[in-house]
Amino acid sequence: MTNSSSVVRSEKLGNVACITIDNPPVNALSSAVRAGLLEAVQAADADASVQAILLVGQGANFIAGADIREFGQAPKPPSLPEVCNRIEDCAKPVVAALRGAALGGGLEIALAAHYRIALADVKLGLPEVQLGLMPGAGGTVRAPRLVGAQASLDLMLSGRHVKAKEAVALGLVDRLAEGEDASGAGLAYVQELLSKGAPVRRTRDAQGLADRAAAQAAIDAARADTAKKARGLFSPGKIVDAVQTTLDKPFAEAVRLEREAFMACINSPQRAGLIHAFFAEREVVKVPEAKAAQPRALERVGIVGGGTMGAGIAVSALDAGLPVIMVERDNASIARGRANVEKVYDGLIAKGRMTAEAKAAVMARFTGSTSYDAFSDVDLVIEAVFEDIEVKKAVFAELDRVCKKGAVLATNTSYLDIDAIAASTSRPQDVIGLHFFSPANIMKLLEIVVPAKVAPDVVATAFALAKRMKKVPVRAGVCDGFIGNRILAVYKQAADYIMEDGASPYEIDEAVRAFGYPMGPFQVTDLAGGDIGWATRKRRAATRDPKARYVEVADRVCERGWFGQKTGRGFYLYPQGARVGQPDPEVLAIVDAERQKKGITPRSFTADEIMARYMAAMVNEGANVVDQGIALRPLDVDVTFLYGYGFPRHRGGPMKYADMVGLPKILADIRRFAEEDPVFWKPSPLLERLVAEGKDFSSLN
Ligand code: 3HC
Ligand code: NAI
């Protein structure tokens, strides 16, 4: 018995039809796979010599789910619910042998099978929510029947992956098998079931919802929790509704209604944004240097500076399993650096997420020193000393003196010219920027800043380090602020103008939160410390364009020593160390005074007007950054903002957002704003070009 489809094979092994899904890289359920699977299952069910059916995936995974690339195109038959129903309807036992990913539609296929066996490396889950979706092939109907409402809601609302042991404990999987041969283990299990005369056992008949009161309580709790946490997200509410339907309606109707709700999710802009984010974070590592060159060996890491960033970077390196040598200025500073590192692990111990033994084992890989000679054998050094070009050059002179040939010399500078730092050494080919974000052990983003003379294998090494540290790396070119902070400076300026023209900082923060950010820009300033931006503004004062508009409110706030949370007040008041700030009438008075000084009559802004300006500024500078080659593609800007600046993931990133709004609208906004302030609002040449050509940013990804 063979099957015509190239992505689904069916072979008869004695009395068992073994159906293999073979659609690299992850056996996603493309329309060809669905068609092939349906045909193979029908044929096996109709074949009188077949007594049982085994479903397996070729390679390391069972099935990673629906083919995400097909979303947004016209759906092609057969649908996945149809395939799942046909599997469940089979008159002979169907066994799914799982390994690797059995996710989304892949798990739904497994749930439609009558028995499930898994290898130890299995990852099961219903992660659709992370793509703005919900299970759409019976997942919301079969999972609650199999494992109950509470467990299935947890799976569907978190999207988390469940490992083998938990899958058995939950009842998602019947049996675990040793080894790496899913079809071998599956065949043995099939024979055992046949020899016992095991019946066809359909999940639709399972009794996980027998205790209706418990199920209803779980649904109510999930609904309340979702209302609190799902801030503006569309699909979580649909998931809860679907489980309610499952409890209230017969099986077939619940499956039909699930499909309707799934299609509503498919058609939502959030799905487009989230799936863009999924692919963008996989594309972002595909950079020319990483393709052209092999990374250098990376066994030992050095760090200069044990302050906020140096300590966080040390934790990231230690967590990646690397030995770390930290150099500081003197004994007191190195003791403080070590204490900063230990504080992170002590926090984990206090939360019960680490043992004292585990901390001791990690700290055994940490060495502190006051002598650069300690770096003689490191493969890579990351400098995180004060943001001062002369101090950095002095540090790099020392690194140049002591480090072995071929060691990678990296700086964590936020704004300084890395070409100039590289030029101050005798080995510019080894110098690169590794711009971590604070707190460095938590934030995922790592800008890999590529100076003119750096060797490709140094860039490849930086990407390899990011992978090892589980960071999301973005390649950036050298300029003031690289990708993220450069764009931030521009939209922060737009926020200041909106404030001076009439909106309060609190209205602006609220509009930005309503858009989907966890915090608004003035809250972020208070959290990071107003003094940091103040120092930068003072540094730039001499080179500022005298014609450009400059808002002094933040300087007035800082002059009073109000640096934000750490000083108990900034743009907000933080009485008794409160973490959530309260509006401060004195700040509003400062804003008013500044307006009066400049003769500005305040006007009101709606949240939409605030966001139109905020986003236009962000997108326009994003376009400049792409146009000037600072970012390789628009998607690199998107990933930077998703992972470094809290940009709402369901909007895909600023450039994807602009595509969805339409570039002509963004450009028209900018031209309108330019009528008031042509110095600040200058349309990016790239934006103008794309609009003229009728293209969008995605054409450059
Ligand atoms: N469809 C299409 N392509 C997919 C895919 C999918 N479902 N899942 C992964 N891929 C692609 C990736 O884009 C990547 O392609 P590339 O090599 O060209 O960049 C390749 O497969 C390998 O993926 P990863 O780099 O992510 O490999 P990992 O080994 O790190 O992870 C994985 C594998 C755990 C399967 C991970 O890819 C993943 O989580 N995939 C998404 C799973 C998912 O969300 N499934 C639900 C889909 S929605 C659904 O099923 C709806 C249904 O209810 C109707
Ligand atoms: P910090 O002031 O907390 O720490 C700097 C440390 O460097 C101090 O412990 C100091 O003793 C040490 N140091 C100074 N000169 C030294 C020398 N010659 N040799 C050895 N050690 C020396 O500063 P922070 O915030 O950690 O910043 C460090 C760098 O990271 C700066 O370049 C900054 O721009 C950058 N950065 C900061 C971010 C932040 O949010 N704090 C974010 C991203 C980058």
Image: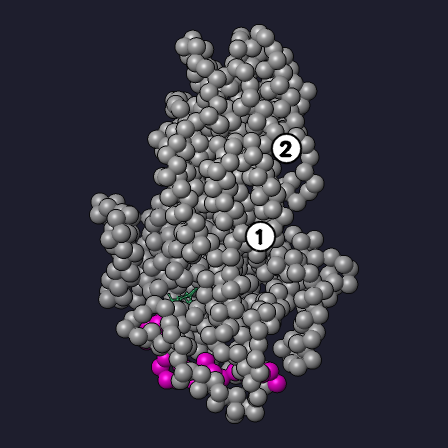
- Looking at the rendered structure, the kind of residue marked 2 is Ser
Q: CA distance from mark 1 to mark 2?
A: 22 Å
Circle 2: element type: loop
Residue position for label 2: 79
Residue 86 located left or right of residue 510: right
Magenta residue span: 547-567
Which of the marked residues, 1 or 2, is nearer the chain's N terminus? 2
Q: Disc number at residue 72?
A: none
At x 36%, y 39%, the residue is: 214
Query: Which residue is drawn at the image coordinates 46% and 25% (left, top)?
Result: 205
Residue 154 percent across, percent down from the top left: 41, 42
Please tell me which residue lies in front, 425 or 171.
171
Q: Nearer the viewer, mark 1 or mark 2?
A: 2
Where on the image, by quarter, is ligand 2? bottom left
Residue 182 vertical placement versus 465 (above, below): above
The x and y percentages for residue 517 are 49, 62
Frontmost residue, 129 versus 377 = 129
Q: Amino acid at mark 1?
A: Gln
Res 667 seen here: yes
- Which label was assigned to residue 270? 1
